[in-house]
Amino acid sequence: MTVLPTISFAKIAAPKKGTAVILAAKDGKLPPLASEIDPSGVLAKALEVAKFKGKAKAVVDVVAPAGAAVDRILVVGVGEGDSIKETDWASFGGIVRGKTASDQHVSVLMECDGVDVTPEAAAAFAQGFLLRAYDFNKYKTKKADDDDGKDKNVAQKTALMVDNVAASKKAWETAEAVARGMMLARDLVNEPANILGPVEFAARAEALSALGVEVDILTEKEMKKLGMGALLGVAQGSVRPPRLAVMKWNGGKPKDKPVAFIGKGVVFDTGGISIKPAGGMEDMKGDMGGAACVAGLMQALAARKAKVNAVGVVGLVENMPDGNAQRPGDIVTSMSGQTIEVINTDAEGRLVLCDALWYTQDRFKPKFMIDLATLTGAIIISLGHEHAGLFSNDDGLAADLTAAGKASGDTLWRMPVGAAYDKLIESPIADMKNVGPRWGGSITAAQFLQRYIENDTPWAHLDIAGMVWADKPGATWDKGATGFGVRLIDRYVRDNLEG
Ligand code: BES
Ligand code: MN
Ligand code: ZN
C-alpha cells in the first residue's frame, strides 16, 4: 500500500540534508535563510535563468547546488501574498509532494517575504501534501515508480518549519483527521465491487467503533420488518444481501438533537433490468461515493473529537439484473408508507435514499438532514466536474453549505426545487413514479427525495455524481477517487455547529 509521508513541525532553521523547499511570493524576495541554505548563491542565478517571478504554483528545481548541505532546492511561487486562501495552501502542499515523491527527507520553510503564513496555512499545506501522497496501489504487484523512474515507495520524512510550532501542530490535528477521512472515502470508492459489497462496506463502517463511533448494522431481515420496500426492491436482484449502517458520534451536549448525514451506497450499479450500456460501466463501482463520504466524515469527526452529535446513515445495496430482480412497472411500498411505481430500475439511488432518509428522520428526529449521492448523470451535464449540485428546502442551510464549499474547495452550486417539478413524478397508479421526463433529471430526482422530508426539517441534497471520481490528476489527488464531500461537511460542521 501507499507509504504515506511522516509529517512533523519544527522551528525555522536551515535544513542540513535532503530537499529544501523555499516559498516566494510574487516579485518577493527569498527569505533570509535562503542564503544559509545556498551559501554560494546559485539560486539567484537559477531563478533568473528560469525567469521566476513568484507566480502561484511556479516551481524552480535546483539539484546538487554547489556548496550547499542539501541535495536539492525547490523554490515554489505562492503568488499575490494577500490573497492566498487555505485551498491555495493545500494546492501548494500537493504540488510540492508531487515534485518530491521519491525524496527521503523534505524540509519546507514555511515563511515567505510579505506573507503571513498562519498555523492554518501550514496545516492546509500539510493536508494537501498528505492528500497528494495517497495512491491506491494495493493491487499492483510490482513497485510503482514516479515519472522519472525513481522508486516512490520511500518512507518519506517531511518537516514543515514554522513560526509557531505548537499552534501549527494543533491546526494539523484537525486537518490531518480530515485528510484521513478523505482517504477512507477514496479507499472505499477505489475498491472494486467484487471486494467491497454491502457486507464488506458495513464492516468498514463497523471498524470506526475503534474511534468511539457507535455503529449499528441493520440486516435485510430487520429492514424488512421496518418496511423498507424501496431499498429492498433494489437489492433483490443481487446475491449479496443489503445492509444499512448507522454511525453515531456523540461529541456534543447529551441533550442536543443530532445532525444527520445520509449516503447512497450502491456498491455497484448495473442499472438492473433497465441495464446500462457496457461502455464506462466499470465507473459504477463508485456509486457508493455518497456513503463513502459519510463514512469518511464520521471518521474525521471522531478522530478530531468534534463537539457535535452526528449520525451517519448509509444504505448499502447492489443493483443487479437477475431472475429475481425488480422489473420496470413494479410497485413498491417505502418505509414511509408511500408507494412508488418503478418505471426505470436504473433510477435506484432515490429508492435507497428514501428509506434511509425516512428511517433517519423517524428514529433520530435530527436538527437537519444532508444527503450525499451519486444520483444522476444529468447533474454532470448541468455542472460538469466543477461543482456538485445542491438542492435544499432551507435558504440558510444552502447558503452555509455553499460557503463551506468555497472555503474547503469542494464547491457546490444551488439548483431549484419546487411544485412545478414535483408534478413531473406523479404516477397514475401509485403515489409517485421513480423517474420524470428526460429534462431536469437531477431536479426531479431531488423532488422525489423531498417527498420523504417531513414537515419543515431543514434538508439538503448534494448530487455528487460528477465529483467523486477524477479522470486526471489535480493538485491534491491523483487519478481516481477524490474523497469529495468530507472536507466540505467537516468545514460546515466546524463553522456552524461547534464552538
Ligand atoms: N448512479 C447513477 C448516476 C450516475 C451517472 C453516477 C454517472 C455517476 C456517473 C444513477 O443511479 C443513474 O443511473 N441515474 C440515471 C437516472 C435515470 C434512469 C432517470 C441517470 O442518470 O441516467
Ligand atoms: Mn442507476
Ligand atoms: Zn446509481
Image (tube, rainbow, N blue to C red):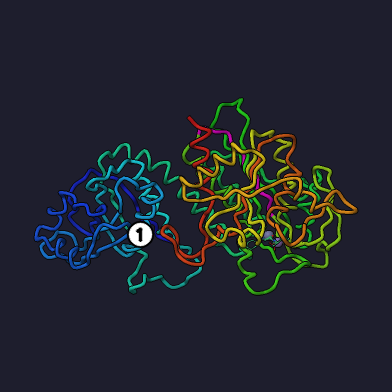
- In magenta stretch: residue 233: no
Query: Magenta: predominant secondary structure element?
Result: strand
Locate residue 131: give its quadrant: bottom left
- In magenta stretch: residue 308: yes
Q: Residue at x 64, y 38 (%)?
A: 394
Q: Quadrant of the N terminus?
A: bottom left
Seen from the viewer's position, the closer of residues 47 and 206 is 47
In the image, taking residue 398 as reference, residue 78 lies left or right, namely: left
The residue under label 1 is which amino acid type? Answer: Ile
Q: Is residue 261 above or below residue 148?
A: above
Pointer 1: residues within 10 angstroms few (<14), some, or many (20+)?
Answer: many
In the image, taking residue 339 as reference, residue 413 lies left or right, namely: left
Within the displayed image, which quadrant is ligand 2 positioned in? bottom right
Locate residue 344: give its quadrant: bottom right
Residue 149 image point, x, y percent: 34, 74
SS for dot 1: helix
Magenta residues span: 307-316
Seen from the viewer's position, the closer of residues 118 and 213 is 118
Q: Which residue is mark 1?
A: 95
